[in-house]
Amino acid sequence: MTERPVERQDDGWREDRRVLWVTATVAAGSFAVASAVQATYIYAAIAPGWSAVDAWSRVLANLVAVVAFLATLALWRQHRRSDPRDLAIGVVLAALVAAVLRTVVQVPLGVYHDYAAQTSFVEAVSGFCVGLVSASFATWAMLSRRRVRAQAQAAERLAVERALAIRALEDEEIRVRRDVAEGLHASVQQRLVVVVAQTAEVARRLRAGTADSSDARLLEGVCAGLDEVREQDVRGMSRLLYPDQLEVGLVPAVRALLRRVPSSVATQLDVDPVVREMDDPVSPTLAPTERLLAARVVEEGIGNALRHGHPTSLSVTLRVADGVLAVGVDDDGCGVPRDAVRSGTSRLAERLAVVGGTLELVGVDGKGTRLVGRLPVAGRVLEV
């Protein structure tokens, strides 16, 4: 999994090098040939004494400069640079090397038999300007291609993230459906089977005229069983689908969750005023999905603490900072083993990751546990 980004980066560098070299070669080579032919023609027409210098000598001198120009860009590794200062240094360095070498090789190639100071200055400056323009143009082409490639990769990542998000939502819907189906089958159905059998027995005795006071107690037990099914199983399935009071707001839903904590455990809710403002039932800015995820974090933290931590106190905090809603659940229990919460907590972490959030469990196997969920909220601008 870790090799793919490296391979993609190497491919990008190879493409940058190709674009840089091709563009630099075309630009500098065109200047080299065109300027040599033009200079030779002008010299031959205006200064007859220069007619002995042919175009090929000047072309060869300029091509030597072009090779040095490309070698400098390669040695400087211009295609791997991204800092503007490094890119500028590469451009100037390549132009300078090309100008100096072009000026130097013109004497042995017979372009000039002797250099005057003014001639050397003009040749060096003109060569430097040509190299500067060519290197700048090639670097601009490379950066433009790099930006296009980055945009394409960003679009590809976005498409993958959207596909993963859809898949995660589908998996979560399947999980909830499975949990509800298992709860209905394993608990509600079995309890109702017992209730139906007991009710049928009382009805049989009533028809036979053999009913007595024990049947009244049996009916009372049936009523108690039905009430237990309603209170525990049916409401439990309902909470699995949608927590209590969540349609009113996040804070009421969290209070409803804390009311389910045994009275032997002290509870505390600390809510940031900004959260209360965003959770205002009259004009809420927290989206229903944001409230649901935040409530799931509280539910997960309370469940882990009660199942594994055996706490005496439990507190929930709701904070907003820089467009991120932070939901913390703290307890003073003995700690939660990692293997005990791996399934549920990991599943919740995946759901938060879909919307760009995180879930962190700290204090594991120590004194006390803290579960913190963070998710960007649409009601505030997320500052990066």
Image (cartoon, rainbow, N blue to C red):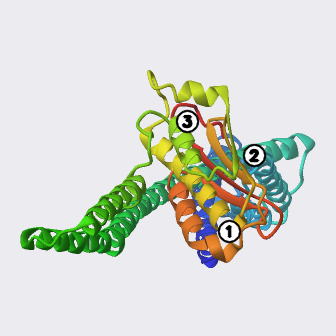
Above/below status of 100 relative to 64:
above
Which residue shows up at 71% across the image and 57% down it? 53
Q: Residue furthest left?
A: 207
Earlier residue among tags 3 and 2 = 2
Q: Relative to residue 349, is residue 152 drawn left or right?
A: left
Nearer to us of marks 1 and 3 is 1
- Could you say which is closer to the camera, residue 169 or residue 33? 169
**Quarter of the image that includes the C terminus:** top right
The disc label shown at residue 323, or none: none
The residue where tag 1 is placed is 308
Q: Where does residue 171 sit, x and y in percent of width and height?
A: 39, 67
Q: Where does residue 246 sit, x and y in percent of width and height?
A: 45, 40
Callout 3: SS: helix
The disc label shown at residue 84, or none: 2
The residue where tag 3 is placed is 251
Q: Callout 1: few (<14), some (14-19), or many (20+) C-alpha neighbours within 10 Å?
A: some
Q: Residue furthest right?
A: 117
Above/below status of 139 relative to 211:
above
Q: Relative to residue 201, is residue 312 drawn left or right?
A: right
Which residue shows up at 49% across the image and 34% down it? 286
